[in-house]
Amino acid sequence: MKIRAATLGAFLICVSAALWGLDGVVLTPRLANLQVPFVVFLLHAVPFLLMQPFLFRSYGRLRRMAPRGWLALALVSLTGGLLGTFAIVRALFLVDFNQLSVVVVLQKLQPLFALVLAALLLKERVTSRFLALAVVAVGGAYLLTFGASVPDAAVNAITIRAATWAVIAAAAFGSATVLSKLLLGSLDFRDATFARYGMTSVMALVFLVVRGIGMPIATVTDANWIIVLIISVTTGSGAIFLYYFGLSRVRASVATICELCLPLSAVLLDYLVNGSVLGPWQWLGAGLLVGAILRISTHGEERKATLADDPETSGKAGDMNS
């Protein structure tokens, strides 16, 4: 039964990662006529409303949640919900359909930030091996974004801004990955998804009011509503729902491998839908980035398993990577 559960969990994470690739390359860029904060609100409020008939019992379980769970929920909603979504939507809008896959693949830096945050929270030692792999990952991200050339601040201004926002999104989503594990300790994946979308909707609404943007519903076209609804039931809450379900059944190393479906689907869809093709140096950068992140994540899990199985070291604090 455990093998079946793990297989199902891995499959669902693959599906959710592929859906996020579809979202970043095909769907969200079609909302570029709207203001970014308002898009963030719509992408959380609409799915939250659609969940009401199915998950209304979650309110009762949320009322019984401990303060620690509420803190984890607030932090996940702030990082992975409000900040992460704002940053990635901003990055996608900036590139204006020009190699959207670059922005999406840059999100693969998020495990790097997740492991750094885990080290800070768990007081694990950051080793030279981790730092070396982190340098490789950052170098790969540079090649993916700019190729082998030195970026000109004037010529590459939009690319630099888009890449910066993509990295901010990676940091936010990476932080949310660590915090989601804490949240899943208080809620199951259904309640966690419901609560995260509800709290992020409230945070986004507050942001709209404070910034004086209000609710520009009149700017939303019929085509926009169709895209928002598609995102709501597939790549948005649907993908998060599948991801939480899968994450509760597999180890982090397995989840990291499954999440490779994100860059693969992004590159493929960007070519099929937008005709964008990565250059040789960008392919090299993508390979270095994904390979380094994969090695960082899987080695960390292998190290933990080794320490747990060794009676002489199981009681000692383990390194993040050795």
Image (cartoon, rainbow, N blue to C red):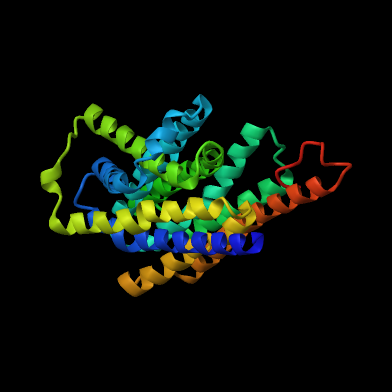
Q: Is residue 128 left or right of residue 80?
A: right
Residue 144 is situated, as x and y percent measured from the top left of the image, at 48, 60
Viewer-closest of 14 and 140: 14
Q: Can you tell which quarter of the image residue 19 is in? A: bottom left
Q: Is residue 15 left or right of residue 39?
A: right
Residue at 13% across / 47% down in the picture?
Answer: 219
Instruction: Please identify the residue farthest to the right as the structure is shown.
Output: 312
- The reply to whether residue 193 is visible in this rendering is yes
Q: Is residue 45 left or right of residue 297?
A: left
Instruction: Please identify the residue farthest to the left as the structure is shown.
Output: 218
Residue at 46% across / 56% down in the picture?
Answer: 242
Residue at 14% across / 43% down in the picture?
Answer: 217
The vertical placement of 115 against 149, above or below, is: above
Number of numbered discs visible in the structure rendering? 0
Residue at 61% across / 64% down in the picture?
Answer: 4
- The reply to whether residue 95 is visible in this rendering is no
Instruction: Please identify the residue farthest to the top as the structure is shown.
Output: 67
Residue 49 is situated, as x and y percent measured from the top left of the image, at 27, 44
The vertical placement of 20 against 154, above or below, is: below
Which of the image's four quarters has the N terminus?
Answer: bottom right
Viewer-closest of 237 and 50: 50
Q: Can you tell which quarter of the image residue 116 is in? A: top right
Residue 290 is situated, as x and y percent measured from the top left of the image, at 56, 60
Residue 220 is situated, as x and y percent measured from the top left of the image, at 15, 50
